[in-house]
Image (spheres, rainbow, N blue to C red):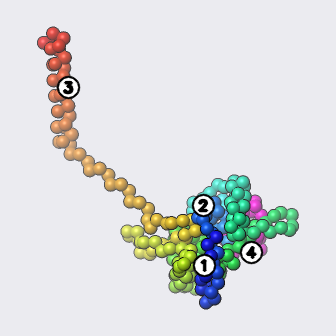
Amino acid sequence: MSISSVTNLDGERKPRHLPARELDAIELRVLGALMEKQLSTPEYYPLTLNALVAACNQKSNREPVMELSESEVQRALDRLQDEKLVWKVMGGRAVRYDHNLDSQWQLDRRSKALLTLLFLRGAQTAGELRGRSDRLHEFEAIGEVEETLQWMATPPSPFVRELARRPGQKESRWAHLLGGAVADAAPEPAAAAPSEPLSARVARLEEQVAAVIDELRELKKKLGED
């Protein structure tokens, strides 16, 4: 596990414990779902395995939509427990699960809300993040979102990165880095081969027909029919 010391948004310098490996798509979906439900419906948190599977496979506010099985989510939880990113909460009639990111990654409510959205919906602009965060944290202005993103992008252990603007885009997008390197943009589609002029195609066909006629003549000569 990678450990670095960072100054949090309140000015305190604390250690940040980042995983030593890239998290896969299922692990990120599990963490995103846990953070989302903790912030939006704390009365039902921590989550049982069944509730967590339903949250991971939710059709709304997810990009992409997933169809994860209970066993896939359980295996992801086991791996995240090894990284000390998730705790198993005992007691009651069912085992429940709670994330441990607040202390491991030094997240406050603002940074946790933004990271939740990036985990669940991929790269987004600061405006999109503010518009989608109302159930998680109410940002007073887009400047507060941008300030939080800048802190989250601070070395030595950044969580996010600002992506280069695509042609025609007014705002740059932000992406999280917990799943590995992020490409700035989708690769440009390959340019279509230029269309061949009709005259050139006709000329080539005429050459091919003439060659076939010559071959037939040679064949007739060999057969003594000419």
For image coordinates 67% across by 71% down, the residue present is 35
Which circle marks residue 212 in the picture? 3
Q: CA distance from mark 2 to mark 1?
A: 24 Å
Q: Mark 3 or 2, which is nearer the eye?
A: 2
Relative to 75, say whether 216 is above or below.
Answer: above
Marks 4 and 2 sit apart, C-alpha to C-alpha, by 24 Å
> Is there a contact, CB below 8 Å, between mark 3 and mark 1?
no
Q: Looking at the image, which residue is at 86% across and 67% down?
A: 92
Does the magenta-highlighted stretch encompass residue 49?
Answer: yes
Cα separation, mark 3 vs mark 1, equals 76 Å
Dot placed on the residue nearer the N-terminal end, 3 or 1: 1
According to the picture, the residue beneath numbered tag 4 turns out to be 42
Q: Gap in Å between the C-alphas at discs 1 and 4? A: 30 Å
Which label lies toward us, 3 or 1? 1
Q: Residue at x 36, y 54 (%)?
A: 190
Q: Secondary structure at mark 1?
A: strand
Q: Which residue is mark 1?
A: 4
Residue drawn at the location 62% of the way across and 76% of the way down: 3
Q: Residues within 10 Å of mark 4 (few under 14, many from 20)?
A: few
* Nearest-to-viewer mark from 4 and 2: 2
As shown in the figure, which amino acid type bears the numbered disc 4?
Pro
Classified by dominant secondary structure, the portion drawn in magenta counts as: helix
The residue indicated by pointer 2 is 25
Query: Residue lying farthest right?
Result: 92
Of helix, strand and loop, which one carries label 2? helix
